[in-house]
């Protein structure tokens, strides 16, 4: 049951993160990407297309890992840890983005 609620929760929070990143991409004179892996892959001011592609890729990757863990009948603690850490990380990112002024833009 955890996965039935957790995976959509992750995907929704991740979509909010993408929306904030799209706002960033339209306001590069005030904001820039600061997550090291994202900066390395996309630069400090990714285009809207890069932002959506990166977000979609992250969403597919997360879903795929969740699916693989479910298919492998991973222990409940493994699945719970995966989802809690993933969702918590996204919520933290969205919260920090909001505090610095990033809003949502689609």
Image (tube, rainbow, N blue to C red):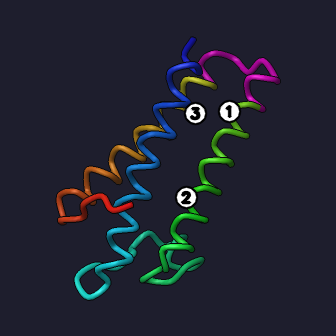
Vertical placement of residue 17 versus 75, above or below: below
Region rendered in magenta: 68-78
Q: Position of residue 47 (x, y in %)?
A: 49, 80
Q: Residue at x 60, y 77 (%)?
A: 41
Vertical placement of residue 77 versus 95, above or below: above
Callout 1: helix, strand or loop? helix
Disc 1 and disc 2 in contact, CB within 8 angstroms: no
Residue 72 belongs to the span the image colors magenta: yes
Outermost residue toward the top? 1
Q: Circle 2: is it few (<14), some (14-19), or many (20+) Cα within 10 Å?
A: many
Distance between mark 2 and mark 3 Cα atoms:
18 Å
First in sequence: mark 2 or mark 3? Answer: 2
Q: Which of label 3 and label 1 is nearer to you? A: 1
Vertical placement of residue 8 versus 91, above or below: above
Disc 3 and disc 1 in contact, CB within 8 angstroms: yes
Q: Which of label 2 and label 3 is nearer to you? A: 2
Callout 3: helix, strand or loop? helix
Q: Position of residue 21 (x, y in %)?
A: 39, 66
First in sequence: mark 1 or mark 2? Answer: 2
For residue 66, the mark is 1
């Amino acid at each position: 049951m955890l996965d039935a609620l957790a995976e959509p929760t992750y995907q929704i929070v991740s979509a909010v993160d993408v929306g904030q990143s799209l706002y960033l991409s339209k306001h590069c004179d005030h904001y820039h990407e600061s997550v090291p892996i994202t900066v390395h892959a996309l630069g400090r001011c990714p285009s809207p297309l890069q932002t959506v592609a990166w977000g979609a890729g992250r969403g597919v990757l997360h879903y795929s890992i969740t699916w693989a863990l479910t298919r492998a009948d991973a222990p409940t603690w493994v699945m719970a840890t995966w989802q809690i850490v993933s969702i918590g990380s996204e919520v933290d990112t969205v919260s920090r983005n909001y505090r610095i002024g990033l809003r949502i833009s689609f």
